Image (cartoon, rainbow, N blue to C red):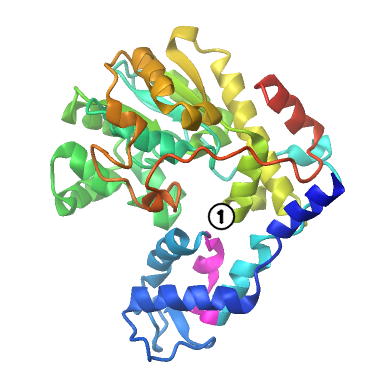
Amino acid sequence: MTGEKERANEEHEAQPFQATFTAVEAILRELSGAAAGAEISRDSIIVGSAGYEGETLLGGGDGFGRFSVQIAMKLGCIPYPLEEVEQLSVKQFCEMYLRDSYPPAPTTPLRPEQYEFGSKVQAVGTAGDPSEFPICFSLGCARSGTTLFRVMLNAHAGIWAPGELHLAQFSTMAARARGIKPVLRRMPIPEIAERFSDSIDSTSSRFGRWEDDAVPVEEVYRELFDADPDRLIVDKTPSYSDSPEILEAIGSQFTNAKYIYLVRNPVDVIRSLVKTQLYKGAIEGFPPGMNPYQVSEAIWTANNANITKFLDGVPNDRQERVYYEDLVAEPEKTMRRLCEFLGLPYESRMADPYRENSGPIAAGAGDMYVHSFKRIENREVQPTFYPLGAKCKDLASTLGY
């Protein structure tokens, strides 16, 4: 057992700087159009803030957000601190990526008080009358397979399952504009344009009016429903489960909503949250010095505890639980069951969405590797590589792990 733990830890040790530099250099050549012979050194500036006037590889004062998404999709990391950097060199980025990407695994389990998760995403409340039109929310912790699941649902001609809308935790679109990360603010526009059968430019203008006029979020949902009533909206935004208040607001606003709860083995989710550095989006809610694996463990525990508690108050005929492990092992059987739950006929392409997807796979928020897959991969559950805390183990056991 000791040997297995050591091997598991070795998998997560930091990669050498040179290997990371080589990978970043290749990506920067592709993104910037630099010729093979052009020099890209460790001191080359990748992007600069709006006030930076020096030469950069990507150019433009808006480069930070663009680079964040592009590098995340290609290298597999989320460089959250970029917004705080005036100018970013190749060396800085490589060091930033290496610093916390593959930390050593902890040797002691989390204490109960360390699980307290102070999410930065809080419900701002809802306004207006409850909405009774059909809608479904796909709930699950980030890195639980939610993007794959969304792609499978979106392959059905009668379902509109966009990327991440990040709507339900806000009362108005103005509040959303103020409270959401810039890189996520307008990310849903291409898919919303498809919903309205409109151009991206026209939808972008519509989006701007929603924000300027502080349009209530429930009116936006209503417009999305009215645009194509025959295609069920499935809202997959993992951050909804960060806060009990968000889930309660959804339940109060959407009185006939259905819920699909996607759950995955905590060990695999923890590994993935660290590998992609998505834990960094929540790290400020924890005491300083927390190990990234333990931050990720607390995220999994908090998100799934919030979901299970919320669904305890939802009638059984309006909720369905899906295990990620079943989804990838038996996709057809799982999707047939879900179609029955949603009141829709089963469509075979749902079980093989990468071959026959009914619409474009959304870029941006979600799994940055989603475009690279050719098929659904049924991977073995990884062994536990460090001592999990009691809260995580108890909840995992309750969920059947």
- Seen from the viewer's position, the closer of residues 15 and 131 is 15
Q: Quadrant of residue 16?
A: bottom right
Q: Residue at x 68, y 66 (%)?
A: 14
Q: Is residue 140 left or right of residue 397?
A: left
Q: Which quarter of the figure is the C terminus placed in?
A: top right
Q: Is residue 324 above or below residue 311?
A: below
**Part of the protein shown in magenta:** 77-90
Q: Is residue 274 left or right of residue 201?
A: right
Query: SS for tag 1?
Result: loop
Q: Is residue 345 above or below residue 170?
A: above
Where residue 91 appears, as percent x and y from the top left, is: 57, 81
Residue 277: in sight, yes or no? yes
Q: Residue at x 74, y 59 (%)?
A: 10
Where residue 207 appears, as percent x and y from the top left, is: 25, 47
Identity, as a three-letter code, of the amino acid under mark 1: Thr
Numbered circles on residues, count:
1
Q: Is residue 53 above or below residue 99?
A: below
Check disc 1 and report the residue beneath it. Answer: 276
Q: Which quarter of the figure is the N terminus placed in?
A: top right
